[in-house]
Amino acid sequence: MVRMSKASGNASSPAKKATIDQKLRSVPYRNEAMQISRHADGTVLASVPMKRPKYLVPPISWILPFSESRRVELDAIGAGVLDLCDGDRTVENVIERFAQQNKLTFREAQLSVMRFLGELTQRGMVVLVGLDGVRSGSRAKNRNG
Amino acid sequence: MQIVHPADWEMAIACGVDEPGRCCFVDRRHTRLDIRWKPLHFAPHMDKMLDKHRARAEKRQRIETLDDLPEGWRGVLRVEEDGTFVNAGAYFPDWRLLVEATFIWPGRRNSALEKDVLAGTGPMDEQGPTRHWQALGLEVDAPKEFDLRKNEALPGRIVWRFQPDRPKDVRLLIERYAMPEAWLRETLRDWLQEQLEPKAKVIRFEPHMVNSHRGERLISHSRIGTVAGLRGYKSVRLDVAWRCPAEGRLYHVAYTEPTRDEEVFIPEEVAIHCCRPAPVVAESS
C-alpha cells in the first residue's frame, strides 16, 4: 500500500511493545504537519516534514544532501485507511470500517491494517495515541520539528 | 481433527506436517482456545492425570474439577488473576489419540460454549478419497495423499501449499485474495501470466468456468533437471483463476507435475468452495 520515494528513517515504533488490546484501543492521529496531495485515481502523495539531524552542518551538509520532507505515495486503499485515521476512531474502529468496506473478516482486516499503520507510524505520518501516551506523542512532535 | 468453534474465533496457530498436533484460536484481543493432540500407545489414566495436575496447581491457585463436561472429557478449572482457565482432556480409543484443550476466559466464563466446543472436538473419520480443509475463510477438499505443507496468512491473502509424499515434484497451490481490485490492475489473463516463474513458457490460455464463475486457465511448461529433461520430462503447470463476486475474492489454483505430456489436470478430487456470504463485522462500542 505504501510506495516510498525516499528511504525511511530508523525510528522504532512504540507499538511493538504494546499488547493487542492496547493497540486496538489506541487512536491513530494524522501528522498535521504532513501535506497531502490527492490524485484523480484515488492515490495520495504525502509529504512529511523531517527534522534536520544535528550532525548535518557544514561541511558535512555540503556532501550529504538533506531533504526537508519525506514523500510517501499511497494507493487508493492506503489513502482510504489514512482518511479513517481522523483522531476520533480507535484502531479497532478503523479495522472494522476497513473490513466492512472490503468484505473482509475482522482478522483479515486486522492483519492488513495493523501492518499498514505500523508502516505509517514509522514514516511519521500517523501517531498512535494510547499505547504509552506521552512517549509516542512526544516522538511525533519532535519529528515534526 | 475436527474442532467446532465460534465464528469470531480465528485460527492463529496450526501445526505443520510431522509436528505435534496443535491448533490455537484467537478472538480480537485474546487467545481463547489451544488444542493439542498426540497419539498414545496405551490408554491414559485420566483420573491420575487430573490428580497430578491438581497437585501441581493447588499450591498457588484455586482449582476445581469439572464434572459436567461432555462425555469422555475430563477437566479442571483454574482461577488466576488474569482470567479463568479450563484444561480438559479426552482419550479417543479408536484412534488412540489424546486430545487436550485449554480455554482461556479473560472475562466471564461461558460454560455452555465450552461444552459445545468440546462436544464438537475430536478426531474425524476420513471417508472417501478426500480430506476437507477449512480455515481463514478458505474451504478446500484435496486428495488424502496431499498434505498441507505450508500455510501463509498474509495481508489480504491466504496461501496453502499442498504436496504428496511421493512423487515429490507434484505441487498444488491454492490462494485466496481479498480486495481483488487492488491485486488485479490488469486482466485476469495478464495477472495469471505474472504468477508464472520467469523462465516458464506459456503454452495456452483458455476461458474456464469454475463454480459457475468465468475464469481463465493457463498451461505453461518449464525446464526440469538435466537427467529428467533428457528422459523427455518437463515441468507442466496448470493455473486456474477466477473472481467470486459473491465473496469479493480472487481464487488462484496452480497444479504442477513433471511429465512427458503436454498438459496436466488438477486432480478431480480437488474442490474449492466459494460463494459464501460476505462476513459481517460487528462494530465495537
Image (cartoon, coloured by chain):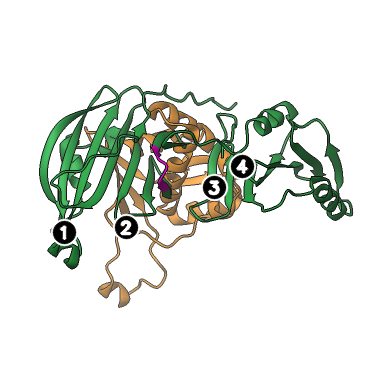
Chain colours: A orange, B green
Q: Which residues are magenta?
A: B142-147
Quarter that holds the C terminus of chain B: top right
**Chain to which mark 2 belongs:** A
Distance between the alpha carbons at the discs numbered 1 and 3:
36 Å
Residue linked to disc 4: A21
The three-letter amino acid code for the residue at tag 1 is Arg
Front residue of B63/A36: it is B63
Residue linked to disc 2: A68
Quadrant location of residue B181?
A: top left
Mark on residue B13? 3
The three-letter amino acid code for the residue at tag 4 is Asp
Quadrant location of residue B241?
A: top left
Tell me, yes or no, whether the highlighted magenta stretch contains residue A7: no
Local packing at callout 2 (Cα closer than 10 Å; few below 14, some 14-19, many 20+) is: few
Front residue of B84/B148: it is B148
Distance between the alpha carbons at the discs numbered 3 and 4:
19 Å
Quadrant location of residue B142?
A: top left
Residue linked to disc 1: B223
**Chain to which mark 4 belongs:** A
Local packing at callout 1 (Cα closer than 10 Å; few below 14, some 14-19, many 20+) is: some
Q: Are marks 1 and 3 in contact (CB under 8 Å)?
A: no
Kindly report which numbered mark, 2 or 4, lies closer to the viewer in this rendering.
4
